[in-house]
Image (spheres, rainbow, N blue to C red):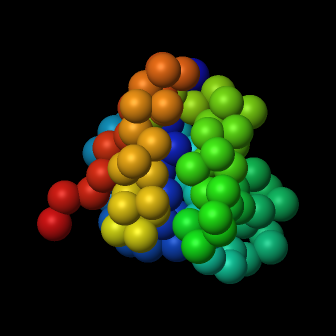
Amino acid sequence: MNILITAASSAKAHQLKRELNSTEILLGDYLDLPDVMLKSGRMLKLPSPQADTYPHQMLAFCLDNHIDTVYLLNATEAVQLQPAEQLFDEYGIKLIPAHG
């Protein structure tokens, strides 16, 4: 299983990746990312939290990419997914919102 860290374009995401020190970490962001990073597979394009179906899009993304833990570094993402936390739990996916 994999760990997803959102807000891949932020320094905080890269710091958390180093702290977790796992080979199974994926970085993703819904903001525009450099094509070279996307093509290399080092970063993934995530659904936008502004979409009405964002929780379901993220659930599908997690299932497709075998993700069992999501670190939500963007407050908008965390707010949008909070009501769907039980749904993610049912699929064995843990949502961890950023603190501070």
Q: Which residue lies at the image location 49% right of the left edge and 31% below the top edge?
A: 87
Vertical order, 47 against 10 (above or below): above
Q: Position of residue 1 (x, y in %)?
A: 57, 22
Q: Which residue lies at the image location 30% right of the left edge and 52% below the top edge?
A: 97
In this rendering, position of residue 96 left or right of residue 57: left
Q: Position of residue 7 (x, y in %)?
A: 48, 66
In this rendering, position of residue 73 left or right of residue 64: left
Vertical order, 4 against 2 (above or below): below
Residue 14 vs residue 85, the one in the foreground: 85
Q: Can residue 55 be seen in the rendering of this structure?
A: yes
Q: Quadrant of residue 60?
A: top right
Q: Quadrant of residue 28?
A: bottom right
Q: Which residue lies at the image location 45% right of the left edge and 52% below the top edge?
A: 81
Q: Which residue lies at the image location 57% right of the left edge and 32% below the top edge?
A: 67
* Image quarter hosting the C terminus: bottom left
Q: Can residue 23 be seen in the rendering of this structure?
A: no
